Amino acid sequence: MVNPENPRPSGATARGTDGNRRAELVEAAVDHVTAHGIGDLSLRRLGAAIGVSHRMLIHYFGTREQLLVEVVRRSERRQRELLSRLHAEPGRSPAEVARLLWRELSDPRLAGRERLFFEICGYALRGRPEAVRVLDGIVADWLEPLVAAEVAAGADAGTARNRARLGLATVRGLLLDLLATGDRAGVDAALEEFLRLFYPPERPG
């Protein structure tokens, strides 16, 4: 739960405080959506869940869709931060990192978060102005950490970028498959096959 609502100060301090407050609300909304899913969640119910009025959410985000865009963007940033932490742990192979990240992304308790991602992307691709911003960086922001991991594994820069993009597209496709079919065994097996092709085991000798 976030802090109780406070009167807005003036001037530069107000802008800084507003920015911090907005960030706090996004973080609280991400936590709630991650834990409980989105369903037909209204601003009024979300506000009650995170301890603010729906008017406060309207003040900072305008509409439910604009808030959900920020929830998706922050969720994506959290996932990239997790990827960076996993890569930073010594002794982890790229395939192990991929499996650990997949375990987080495909956790059935977090399915609402992934449904929201695809829902907002669908709105954006249909040109709904309140959702279009979610497309900013939806690929590019992931490429830097993924390319760095491929380079560290020995790929040249061009190959690393191609592999990073292919890996990102594959994981997102498998997430959509899982949400659509519920076939966890099939999707997990497909991921393992992809990792065998992507990171073939070294031959002895």
Image (cartoon, rainbow, N blue to C red):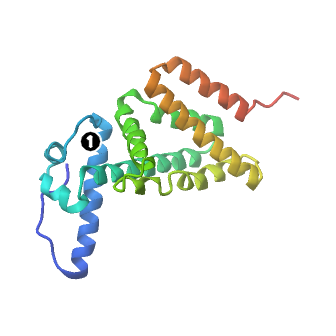
Residue 149 % position (x, y)? 65, 49
In this picture, is 180 found above or below 6?
A: above
Residue drawn at point x = 41 percent, y = 37 percent: 114
For badge 1, the amino acid type reads His
Residue drawn at point x = 17 percent, y = 79 percent: 10
Residue 83 % position (x, y)? 53, 46
Quick one: 169 or 126, which is closer to the camera? 126
Quarter of the image for residue 108 reads top left
Can residue 144 be seen here? The reply is yes
**Residue projecting furthest to the bottom:** 11
User: Relative to residue 60, is residue 131 drawn left or right?
Assistant: right
The quadrant of the image that shows the C terminus is top right
Tag 1 residue: 32
In this picture, is 148 found above or below 19?
A: above
In this picture, is 12 found above or below 204?
A: below
Residue 152 % position (x, y)? 70, 50
Residue 175 % position (x, y)? 49, 32
Quick one: 180 or 92, which is closer to the camera? 180
User: Relative to residue 25, is residue 121 drawn left or right?
Assistant: right
Residue drawn at point x = 54 percent, y = 23 percent: 187
Can residue 152 be seen here? The reply is no
